[in-house]
Image: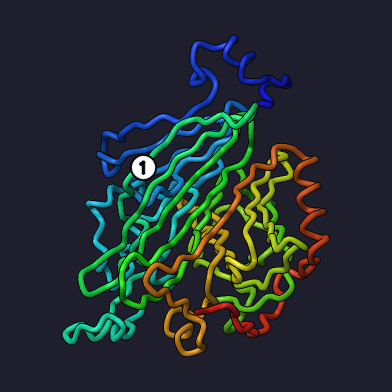
Amino acid sequence: MVQLHGQTYDARSLRERTGMLSQVAGVRLMTLGDGVERGIRMLEFRTGSGLRFTVLVDRAMDIADCEWCGMSVGWHSPAGFRHPGLHEYEGEGGLAWARSFSGLMVTCGLDHILFMNDVPADNYVYGPKRTVSHSLHGRISTIPARLTGYGERWEGERCILWAEGIVQQSAVFGEDLHLVRRIEADVGGNEIRLHDRVVNHGFYRTPHMFLYHINPAWPLLDAGSRYLAPIRDVVWAAHAGGDYSRQGVGYRTMPAPQHGFHEQVWQHEMGADAAGRVPVALVNDRLALGFEVETLKAQFPCQYEWQNFQAGQYAFGIEPSTHHVLGNLAARERGEMIWLDAGDARRYDTTLRILPDAAAIAASEARIRAIAAQPDEDYPAPSGNHLPLEGRS
């Protein structure tokens, strides 16, 4: 059954009240037409309950806008939603990725995440190619998808909005990795379900790394907003050298926009519930609004917290990851790189959930605390204990 406006409707009663479902909910394909966005295909999802979000087909089917009852949840950076044809992957010493960095969710991978690296290329069996040069967070986020379908589907009395596409990261004498992405949301619902499968479509043994850069922002992010997470250990902090508290910002409570702020990144070792789920959330008690990200520990064993509180770029990041923040070369040295042979695949199932009121925030906080009580201090000392990652092929 579909819950809308305080009432319950079956498929027939909803059809009786609308000429088309699009009157209240649906998925619509459109093309952006101006500025750096010009030419990007975009899918708009509306669940009818107040959840609206957009999917950039031509940017790896990442999520751009996200709103709840007209209130913005997702980040718009100064870079905008830049057309992939404008992107220069090799530019600025590998940092040009930041010129295309914007939106609620940006996918990182498929064979590299984190900072720039030159890594051995002997697995591609091509003499002139001794190394692969990786820029920040990999190539996938600026590759257009082949849209294989979208629309609305009834399963009994439940109506599901959906879209599917394939993003191919491929090269001659190099990787041939396919990201098969499906995005779903229920009519009347408050969550986005993301189902990804990364497949080695080629015949070289190929490395695989994967990360979601999930970026809630103002007004959800504001002075006093709280980060909730089942943290068993604070493993690492990029800013821990010297005066750990020099910017006056800890991991738990968010400040107002700052001037001259340098990004802070933390890696936390998360606990999971009995089903292996890891929920984390950013909540704003004043607005009685929260945003929860639920991943599976077996799929994303690592997780980072990104704080970019510079005025004009004000954002927070929840970053589930397949690998430690140590990076590509360290993953190889520690025997933790994921290697995909021909036809091998990895699956990732993630839920992005709006917490629409104080009761939902309280329930999320209780659920998280039942898994692990996060540190009460703002600046817990990092342990440096990057636990061995299991299940690598």
Scheme of colours in the image: rainbow
Residue 353 visible in this rendered orientation of the protein: yes
Give the total of numbered labels.
Answer: 1
Residue 50 visible in this rendered orientation of the protein: no
Residue situated in front as seen by the camera: 199 or 330: 199
The x, y position of residue 366, in whole percent, is 82, 54
Residue pictured at 52% horizontal, 20% vertical = 21
Whether residue 78 sits left or right of residue 279 in the image: it is left
- The quadrant in which the N terminus is found is top right
Residue situated in front as seen by the camera: 246 or 120: 120
The x, y position of residue 210, in whole percent, is 47, 66
Identify whether 232 is placed above or below 186.
Answer: below
Residue pictured at 52% horizontal, 61% vertical = 347
Local secondary structure at mark 1:
strand
Identify whether 332 is placed above or below 64.
Answer: below
Q: In the rendered image, which quarter is residue 97 located in? A: bottom left
Q: In the rendered image, which quarter is residue 389 located in? A: bottom right
Residue pictured at 57% horizontal, 59% vertical = 318
The x, y position of residue 298, in whole percent, is 62, 68
Q: In the rendered image, which quarter is residue 96 located in? A: bottom left
Identify whether 226 is placed above or below 373.
Answer: above
Name the residue tied to disc 1.
148
Tell me the kind of residue under disc 1.
Thr
Residue pictured at 53% horizontal, 70% vertical = 322
The x, y position of residue 24, in whole percent, is 54, 20
Whether residue 349 sits left or right of residue 93 in the image: it is right
- How many residues crowd around disc 1 within 10 Å: few (fewer than 14), some, or many (20 or more)? few
